[in-house]
Amino acid sequence: MQGLMQRRDLMISSLLDHAARHHGNAEIVSRRDDGTRARSTYAQLSRRARRLAQVLHGLGVRPGDRVATLAMNSDRHLELYYAIAGIGAVCNTINPRLAQDDIAYIASHAEIGVIFADPDFLPIVQAVAGTLTGLLRHVVTLSDEAAADCTLPGGMVLHGYETLMQGVSGAFDFPSFDENTASALCYTSGTTGRPKGVLYSHRSTVLHAMMMNFADTAALRAVDRVMPIVPMFHAQAWGLAFAAPIAGAALVLPGRHLDPVSLLDLLNRERVTVAAGVPTVWLGLLDHQRRTGARLDTLQRIMSGGSAFPRALIAEYEAQGIACSHAWGMTESSPVATYNAPKPGNAELDGEALLDRKATQGRAVFGIDVRAENDSGEAPWDGKTPGNLVFRGHWVAGGYYREPETAVGPEGWFPTGDVGVIDSEGYVLLTDRTKDLIKSGGEWISSIALENIAVGHPDIAEAAAIAVPDARWGERPLLLLVPREGCSPAPEAVRAFFRGKLPSWSIPDRVVVVDSLPHGATGKILKTELRRIYAA
Ligand code: ADP
């Protein structure tokens, strides 16, 4: 017997309809390149997204077509998110920090006909346009000006965003269609091989956005002011641009100035209560606070993901009264799979043990199933038996775009490429990426554990542990570290700092002080690059 409840497709446009109707005056603040802040509301966003839908139709975009964005977090990028998905087309958010060659590959693999780009990124478009003849027809500059200075090959037309927007009436309503329709395409930055496309659907996006508002996840409320520092080209800004309208929370979009001084200024001026970003952001912000004594006046909650959130950082933010939540996932999981929120057992943990738990990547949210697998099958939840982490769920990819051989098996387990342990309460602790593991004399050493301890040293700002070949042990850990400003930690003192915190054989034999570490397009330390340099 079938239930008698209404069956309505889960549409991304419904998130915006809800926000416009019930939170029409909630603010959207977008910082422009010159530092000024453009202010609008969900009601205005809804009207402009409809206009933009007409613009897209005018440019010949049809359902299923892929439309690219090369843009930082802004109100216009938000309009694109909603308008492109709203008409049944696919928003391909391209990461402008990728190598030009990868950008050209993505645009041609996704068969992009229209690109919307921040003026800053027009040189990238210009550089790759030659490889897209016959595909790319329209380039639209996301600025107030009609069109910037940019020469394109024949057959491609350059437009100014606002000029196009003025040319349409806005009399348009978003249609409803099958919720499994593709809505967005995000290529993983894959440090090896070509980027791979993750194709989100309306259904996966709406379910993920609802999950983000659970009380034990980001828990956005109408009184919150949310700043996704994580770029909108990075796994859809972790779903916050979809979760905030559900709650009616204000959105503060930081644009391109992501240095600590600009961020702290915007966080305080716009009274931001919740912010999300990678640990590098939190590291930089804290360093700025330490040096200048600057305070975060209104920030209540931090969501951190993308790489391990060191416990030393968590401790310092929490000491300021800012709650830190560590989340784990990947582009392939929309991206949130686990979120760190307390369980009753946390009440029995004291300072250090509690911090250890907060530094774990959290527990699976409803909608996601996670397990660690090793040669004997599923690893027990004992907090010590490592395994390759796999997950499945409503917003986990079933395979990559146009790569049928990557489809997951019938049980749906997606191999994350991460290694970790799960404790008796279900908290997942990542120990490494499979490819970053350090195996010394047959024993595994967790690079994340080494890095976590290193950044707990008062003189160290950032650290990376890598495996280097060793004649006797196969591999040994090498620790690279960036000192805090004005500090010069001695390698021997750093090694001494590790003593007692880890078994002696896992302490790095060599510690190298460097000025900076290379970061990839999504802010992660480029260990492939470090291994290449230091292997010898
Ligand atoms: P994203 O960075 O958006 O989560 P990517 O697809 O770029 O997605 O990278 C996913 C990888 O990033 C994960 O497989 C994992 O190795 C790493 N990662 C993500 N979140 C965490 C975290 N909280 N702690 C440690 N590593 C993480």
Image (cartoon, rainbow, N blue to C red):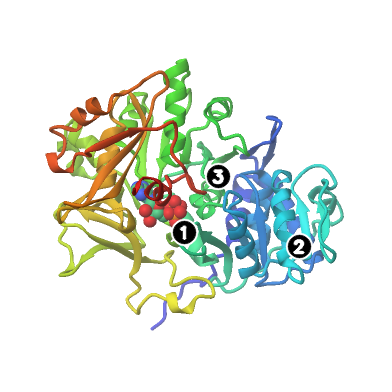
N-terminal of the two: label 3 or label 2? 2
Query: Distance of mark 1 from mark 2, alpha carbons?
Result: 30 Å
- Residue at the image point whose x is 65% and y is 46% from the top: 42
Which residue corresponds to mark 1? 190
Contact flag, marks 1 and 2 (Cβ < 8 Å): no
The quadrant of the picture occupied by the N terminus is bottom left
Which residue type carries mark 1? Gly
491 or 181: nearer the viewer = 491
Which residue corresponds to mark 3? 248
Assign a secondary structure to mark 3: loop
Which mark is drawn over residue 209?
A: none
- Residue at the image point whose x is 25% and y is 40% from the top: 450
Callout 2 environment at 10 Å: few (<14), some (14 to 19), or many (20+)? many
N-terminal of the two: label 1 or label 2? 2
Q: Position of residue 213 (x, y in %)?
A: 44, 49
Q: Quadrant of residue 86?
A: bottom right
Q: Position of residue 163 (x, y in %)?
A: 85, 50
Horizontal side of residue 87 vs 226, given as left or right: right
Q: Nearer the viewer, mark 1 or mark 2?
A: 1
Residue furthest bottom in the image: 1
- Residue at the image point whose x is 40% and y is 42% from the top: 304
Which residue type carries mark 3? Gly
Q: Position of residue 141 (x, y in %)?
A: 76, 50
Assign a secondary structure to mark 2: helix
180 or 176: nearer the viewer = 180
Q: Position of residue 26 (x, y in %)?
A: 61, 40
Query: Distance of mark 3 from mark 2, alpha carbons?
Result: 27 Å
Q: Is residue 337 visible?
A: no
Q: Is residue 514 visible?
A: yes
Which mark is drawn over residue 56?
A: 2
| 61 shown above or below 208 | below
